[in-house]
Image (cartoon, rainbow, N blue to C red):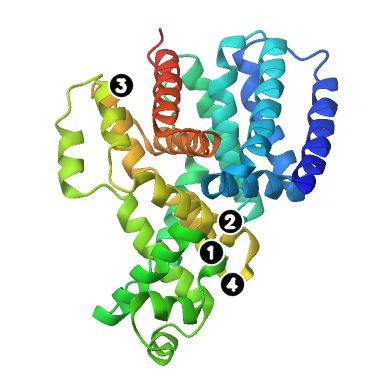
């Protein structure tokens, strides 16, 4: 708790210094995208230790309510910062939803792949966010398209090759979901799977391979199953509340969102998991794209950049709402998403 208080004090200093630099900022939503991209990059690269402290607290509070006060102080810090930023830009109504995008995209930006490409893709996403706030779709994202293509070619999902390997992968995923990445050892996975240590070590020789197998399982569970995908495809246009309620009802959704965050944190830190960075960062948005399309209507076809924006926004919501009750989390997510959709629909 003392460590988090210290990190929060330093983060408050960073926020104050950035606000001091905005004394003469040009007003309007047109000024937000470039500033948002600059702040995300500055926070993730220049304040990486503080960025990790914030993320650790978000994960800790999901499993230990004693971190509730610390998590609340982080929420208060960022809410105040983005309220001041958006007030100075003359767009106060965008503060909460922009804070959620900052939360989600800054989390993803901590995963390093190719520095120049990552920065260019961040600029594209923030430009698309500005378009959303003006009532338009994001438009093209050539840098992100290129990154997604590279990720598909060079970082394909590992596959469990037989029944035993699949059993081990399921056990590793269960450990990540329950207690975090640190608990994934060959011995722990063997106990979880009911297998010998020798069998697990033979199938997956390194800890990185074990984590990779866990990610594969978690990824598959986060991709919409055929039934849900068909339901989204047939959903009535603009039925946002039903879509959001349906998302919240997915079995184990929160548990596996937490597990995914744990694996992303591991990829940020462990060079052995660097090949997963592009995959985790750029091969996402399939579920988000289906939900977003159903909510805004099929007369406005969305593109990959729109899906990435909505995915980042949803990640930010999941991070920010950890530690809340299920009811509080769902109510907050619904209110924020409806506020966002009002901008996107031009209303």
Q: Are marks 2 and 1 in contact (CB under 8 Å)?
A: yes
Where residue 184 appears, as percent x and y from the top left, is 50, 71
Q: Is residue 284 above or below residue 265?
A: above
Local SS, label 3: helix
**Disc 4, SS:** helix
Q: Choose between 271 and 197: the one closer to the eye.
A: 197
Measuring 38% from the left and 74% from the top, which residue is drawn there?
192
Percent of width and height locating residue 47: 77, 45
Nearest to the observer: residue 143 or residue 71: 71
Query: Total of numbered circles in the picture?
Result: 4
How far apart in space, not on screen, are marks 2 and 1 (Cα)? 9 Å
Q: CB of mark 1 within 8 Å of CB of mark 4?
A: no
Q: Position of residue 27 (x, y in %)?
A: 69, 10
Q: What's the CA distance linking mark 4 and mark 3?
A: 40 Å
332 up-or-down from 71: above or below: above
Nearest to N terminus: mark 2 or mark 1: 1
Task: Tell me which numbered mark, 4 or 2, is placed earlier along the sequence.
Answer: 2
Mark 4 crowd level (few <14, some 14–19, many ≥20, 10 Å Cα)? few
The answer, for residue 120, to whether it is visible in the render is no
297 or 267: which is nearer to us?
Answer: 267
Label 1 SS: helix
Q: Which residue is mark 1?
A: 181
Disc 3 marks which residue? Answer: 296
The x, y position of residue 24, in whole percent, is 82, 12
Q: Are marks 3 and 2 in contact (CB under 8 Å)?
A: no
Q: Residue at x 57, y 44 (%)?
A: 61
Residue 23 falls in image quadrant: top right
Q: Secondary structure at mark 2?
A: helix
Among the two numbered marks 1 and 4 on one chain, the one whose residue lies closer to the N terminus:
1
238 vs 139, left or right, is left
The residue wearing badge 4 is 272
Residue with the mark numbered 2:
265
């Amino acid at each position: 708790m003392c460590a988090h208080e210290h990190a929060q004090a330093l983060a408050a200093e960073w926020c104050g210094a950035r606000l001091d630099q905005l004394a003469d900022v040009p007003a309007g939503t047109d000024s937000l995208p470039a500033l948002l991209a600059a702040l995300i990059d500055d926070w993730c690269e220049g304040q990486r230790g503080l960025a990790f402290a914030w993320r650790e607290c978000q994960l800790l509070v999901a499993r230990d309510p004693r971190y509730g006060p610390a998590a609340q102080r982080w929420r208060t810090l960022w809410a105040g910062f983005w309220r001041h930023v958006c007030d100075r830009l003359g767009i106060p109504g965008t503060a909460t939803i922009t804070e959620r995008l900052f939360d989600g995209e800054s989390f993803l930006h901590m995963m390093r792949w190719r520095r120049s490409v990552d920065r260019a893709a961040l600029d594209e996403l923030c430009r698309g966010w500005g378009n959303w706030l003006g009532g338009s779709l994001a438009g093209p994202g050539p840098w992100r398209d290129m990154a997604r293509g590279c990720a598909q070619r060079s970082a394909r999902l590992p596959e469990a090759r037989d029944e035993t390997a699949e059993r081990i992968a399921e056990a590793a995923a269960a450990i990540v979901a329950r207690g975090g990445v640190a608990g994934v050892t060959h011995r722990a996975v063997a106990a979880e799977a009911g297998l010998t240590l020798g069998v697990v070590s033979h199938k997956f020789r390194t800890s990185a391979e074990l984590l990779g197998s866990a990610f594969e399982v978690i990824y598959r569970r986060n991709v919409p199953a055929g039934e849900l995908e068909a339901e989204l495809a047939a959903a009535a246009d603009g039925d946002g509340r039903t879509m959001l309620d349906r998302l919240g009802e997915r079995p184990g959704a929160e548990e596996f969102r937490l597990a995914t965050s744990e694996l992303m944190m591991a990829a940020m830190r462990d060079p052995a998991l660097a090949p997963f960075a592009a995959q985790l960062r750029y091969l996402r948005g399939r579920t988000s794209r289906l939900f977003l399309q159903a909510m805004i209507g099929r007369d406005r076809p969305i593109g990959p950049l729109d899906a990435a924006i909505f995915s980042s926004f949803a990640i930010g919501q999941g991070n920010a709402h950890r530690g809340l009750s299920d009811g509080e989390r769902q109510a907050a997510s619904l209110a924020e998403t409806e506020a966002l959709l009002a901008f996107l629909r031009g209303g």
